[in-house]
Amino acid sequence: MNNIKSHFRYNKSQRNGVFFLLLIIVLLLITFFFFDFSSNTATDFSQNEIESFKKEQDSLLKIKLENSKPKIYPFNPNYITDFKGYQLGMSTEEIDRLLSFRKTGKFVNSIEEFKNVTKIRDSILNKISPYFKFPDWVTTKNNKPNNNFKQPIKQQIEEKDLNLVTAEDLIKIRGIGEKTATRILNYREKLQGFTYSDQLYEVYYLDKEVADKALEYYKILSKPTIKKININTALFKEVLAIVYVDYELTKKIFNYRDEVAEIQSLEELKKIDGFPLEKFDRISLYLVAE
């Protein structure tokens, strides 16, 4: 019993300490129950931040959706393909009507004529017609309905050597503008001249129908003089400069040359693993084994 009492015996300073501790606890409890520490201002500010974030997120999403939409660039509607028509939103029937009309050798030269031929829906026509780009002579004719302009006819285009034609000659072909004519001439220079007529189809962004039309008038009447490279002494960059040879094929050719020491005949190139046999005739135009 005495041991228990000893635990509850405090001196004066200890009793004062306990008293002040209890006083502090009571004051804190009273403060907690009678004062509101919540802040509406903080909540409102946080809500404003959330609203601002949502608006910014919606704005970024709208921009992303806008950028993801397929862009339409100016084009000649006469050369719409099945795939192009599908991308533009045309129906199969509308595309087929245009292709059937084009097979007759005719061209549409206005938005109204395009509508009559395809019977396209107004909603789609209004969407794509601002991007229609007709040749300059068509635009001039439509802007001046009373002039006496006549569409170029076949007899007005003089037949020439494809290796001698100029940009002025090429733009006489319907579908070939200044930029396309320049690409054709640049490619001809890179080839050192056209050896085969079908090399014209290799010009990028040149439609097959336009190339067909050009070959009706411009044919290969004289073979070009091509400077051949000795495959046994050629530099890597010289072989790589050949139009039909890429970097990987050049490496394979030089690895093979190192293995055999000397290439006796160009036919040996066909033995190289992965050599494009369908391009052998083209590649051999620029090489010789000596």
Image (spheres, rainbow, N blue to C red):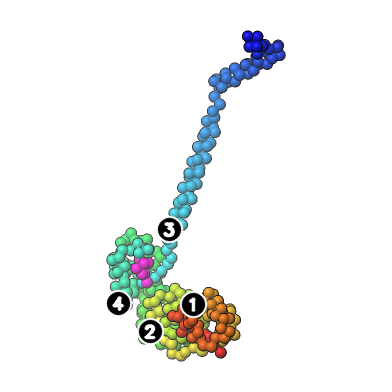
Q: Nearer the viewer, residue 259 or 225?
A: 259
User: Identity of the amino acid at label 3?
Assistant: Lys
Q: Is residue 62 placed above or below 1 in the rendered structure?
A: below
SS for dot 3: loop
User: Identity of the amino acid at label 2?
Assistant: Glu
The image shows residue 18 at horizontal and vertical percentages of: 65, 15
For marks 4 and 2, give the CA distance.
17 Å
**Which circle, 2 or 1, is nearer the viewer?**
1
Q: Can you identify the residue that label 2 sits on?
A: 216
Which badge, 2 or 1, comes first in the chain's sequence?
A: 2
User: Identity of the amino acid at label 4?
Assistant: Thr
For marks 3 and 4, give the CA distance.
35 Å
Q: Which mark is residue 104?
A: 4
For marks 3 and 1, give the CA distance.
43 Å
Crowd rating for badge 3 (residues with CA inside 10 Å; few <14, some 14–19, many 20+): few
Contact between marks 3 and 4 (CB within 8 A): the answer is no
Q: Can you identify the residue that label 1 sits on?
A: 273
Contact between marks 3 and 2 (CB within 8 A): the answer is no
Q: Can you identify the residue that label 3 sits on?
A: 69
The image shows residue 193 at horizontal and vertical percentages of: 49, 85
Q: Which span of residues is magenta-colored? A: 79-85
**Which circle, 3 or 4, is nearer the viewer?**
3
Res 169 → quadrant: bottom left
Q: Is residue 124 left or right of residue 41?
A: left
SS for dot 2: helix
Q: Nearer the viewer, residue 4 or 252?
A: 4
